Amino acid sequence: MSHPIKATRLPPAWPTYTGSAQYVGTSASGRVSVWVDPSLGQPGLANAQWLVQDGDRIAAANDTIFGTTGQPVSVMIYAIGGQTNGTGGADHGGCDYSSGSAIEVDASFGSNPRITGLFEAELSECDMGGNLCGYSNGEALSRWCAAIVSGNALADFATAPTWYQDGMPDWVDRTEHTDQDPDSIGCGMAFISWLMRKGYAIGPIARAMVALGDSGTLAALYARLTGSPAGDAWPAFQAAVQALPNGVTTDDPFGAAALLAHRLLSLA
């Protein structure tokens, strides 16, 4: 006989969710505590139970990417924007573990890896130290972290094809101060794919971007990683994109994820 899970602790103040919250559990390390909107029934509960089990793996992967030891976070799973397929996205209140530790994730009935991806997208921003979050380059980085940790479970969020179709505007030499613009985010996604194809793993990329901070650009990232002038970044990247036989159809047009699948979290 099954019995309903009873809440054993009080939830934090969520950024937007105002309904009742059912406590589901906490990961073995105590790093990830998960709640769910009880009105979602068994499908929502399954999402939450998945995250309790996968939470420590996600947190460890995130630590490896950023070279940090993260702090405990709380996660609320509900139908963001009325969606239950993950397309409602995820959010949190701030860009560090102090202001952003209460994370909201859209339910994704029948597709638990999307829960992993949405959670990692927000968790990664907590490790940006108050920088990058809310900017186009930081959004691209968080989406790449989500893709790597979830096995690209959010491929339908792709923005690089939009950037390509819109004429490839230069968001390498400048950064958009928003995380809602598909062109600037898409440019960042393709640029990171290119850097990874060139042999730079996500760890060094993430750490360099955090070190550069809000004033950093993708061109500055290129200079820091390669030792080449920042002014070389856009022409070299533009030429690489134009040489792609099929153009840009995904967020990973250079096939970096497949190439580096065996060491995506390497710090080498």
Image (cartoon, rainbow, N blue to C red):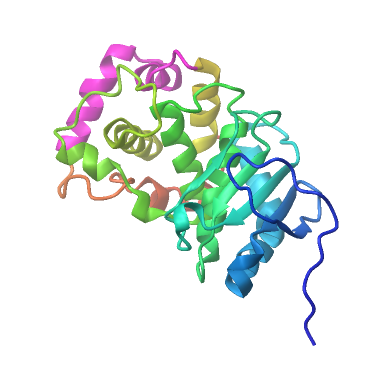
Where, by quadrant of the figure, is residue 16 drawn?
A: top right
Which residue is found at the position 29% from the left and 33% from the top? 187
Q: From the top left corner, tell me how far across and down residue 154 is, in percent.
A: 42, 54
The vertical placement of 31 against 234, above or below, is below
Residue at x 39% of width, y 28% of height = 136
* Residue reaching furthest to the right: 8
Q: Is residue 218 magenta?
A: yes
Please give left or right for residue 67 compared with residue 182 in the image. Answer: right
> Residue 146: where, in percent of width, then height?
50, 47
- At 64% from the left edge and 53% from the top edge, which residue is drawn? 19
- Magenta extent: 214-243
Q: In front: 263, or 135? A: 135
> From the viewer's perspective, is residue 145 above or below residue 27?
above
Task: Give x and y (percent) for residue 244.
Answer: 18, 43
**Principal secondary structure, stretch drawn in magenta:** helix
* Residue at (42, 55) in percent of width and height: 87
Tell me if residue 128 can be seen.
yes
**Drawn side of residue 129 relative to residue 196, left or right:** right
Q: Position of residue 110 (x, y in %)?
A: 51, 71
Evaluate whether residue 267 shows in this view. no
